Image: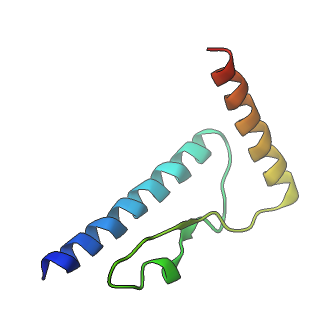
């Protein structure tokens, strides 16, 4: 495996770890984005720049997600 291939594989592994960390954080908040994944079109290149696709969710889940984010931003503003 070449240095470029190793670097590309590491970039993708890192993106997968971030995706998993996000999924875990959402789960701890009682939320699950069913379409959370890496966008395969963004890492198909020799120089991958993977993006995490949050995907689709129902309006009730989007409402819950907005409430969790709002609560977190209020907590951050109070510091």
Left or right position of 74 against 40: right
Give the residue at x 39% y 57%: 17
Q: Position of residue 40 (x, y in %)?
A: 49, 80
Residue at the spot 67% in from the left edge and 42% down from the top edge: 30
Work out which quarter of the rendered image holds the N terminus and state it.
bottom left
Residue 51 rendering spot, x and y as whole percentages: 51, 67
Front position in the image: 29 or 71: 71
Placement of 73 over or under 27, stated as above or below: above
At horizontal 49% and vertical 78% (from top left) the residue drawn is 42
Residue lying furthest right = 59
Q: Residue at x 76, y 34 (%)?
A: 70
Residue found farthest to the top: 79
Name the spot of residue 16 as percent of width and height, x first.
41, 63
Residue 51 vs 62, above or below: the answer is below
**Is 31 positioned to the left or the right of 2 in the image?**
right
Measured from the top left, where is residue 28 in percent x and y?
58, 40
Quadrant location, the C terminus:
top right
Q: Nearer the viewer, residue 54 or 3?
A: 3
């Amino acid at each position: 495996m070449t240095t470029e291939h190793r670097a590309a594989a590491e970039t993708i592994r890192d993106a997968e770890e971030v995706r998993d960390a996000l999924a875990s954080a959402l789960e701890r908040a009682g939320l699950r984005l069913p379409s959370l994944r890496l966008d395969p079109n963004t890492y198909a290149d020799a120089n991958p720049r993977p993006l995490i696709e949050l995907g689709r969710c129902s309006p009730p889940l989007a409402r819950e997600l907005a409430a969790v984010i709002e609560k977190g931003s209020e907590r951050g503003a109070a510091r």
